[in-house]
Image (spheres, rainbow, N blue to C red):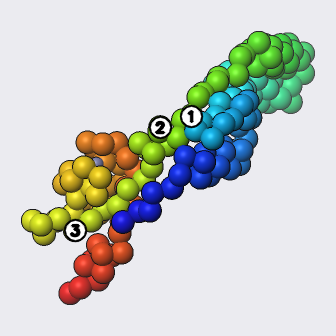
Amino acid sequence: MLSQPTDRQLVDRALTDYTAKGWRIVSQSDSGFQVAEPKKLSSLGMALFVILPAVFGCVLFLIVPSYGIPVLVIAGIGLLIVLADYAVKKEQLHYITADYLRATAPTWILPSATGGVMCAMCGMSVTVTTKTCPQCKRPLVVSAAVHAGLKQP
Ligand SMILES: [Zn+2]
């Protein structure tokens, strides 16, 4: 079975994960922490208002330069709008508690009495390829016991 980590261990592990993802740690304690989700440029805005007109403008410029230039100007304005949108966006703050981390920690897929496999946390019948338990919503990891069973002829 999984060992039971302390609040502090859960918090430390999660802090490392969030920092690695580029999230900014706002505050922390032994039982939880607050993180800011990094802002992202609008990829849809970039595609529609910058990349599309830029590509179209370049092609047009090669054919009829005087038509291509206004389209390239539009791409430039699009870029300014997307950057302005990014600048005014607010960072999303999330409060992560040790209780939350414990409730969403991965659990094992174990052999069940009926010959199938089940979620170790809630006993829900799953398959070895299930990634998230449909009942308790935890990420699932195939246990060594199930791996051993799978290798049997
Ligand atoms: Zn479950």
Which residue is located at x 23 percent, y 85 percent? 152
Is residue 66 in sight in this rendering?
yes
Q: Is residue 133 left or right of residue 69?
A: left
Sort mark 2 into few (<14), some (14-19) or many (20+) by Cα contacts within 10 Å: few
Mark 3–mark 2 distance (CA, rounded to whole Å): 27 Å
Q: Which mark is residue 146?
A: none
Q: Nearer the viewer, residue 97 or 138?
A: 97
Q: Where's the N terminus, which quadrant?
A: bottom left
97 to 127, vertically: above or below: above
| Residue 64 in the image, given as x and y percentages of width and height | 86, 22
Q: Amino acid at mark 3?
A: Pro
Residue under pointer 1 = 96
Q: What type is the residue that disc 1 sits on? A: Ile
Image quadrant in which you'd find residue 29: top right
Q: Position of residue 38 (x, y in %)?
A: 71, 31
The residue labelled by disc 2 is 100
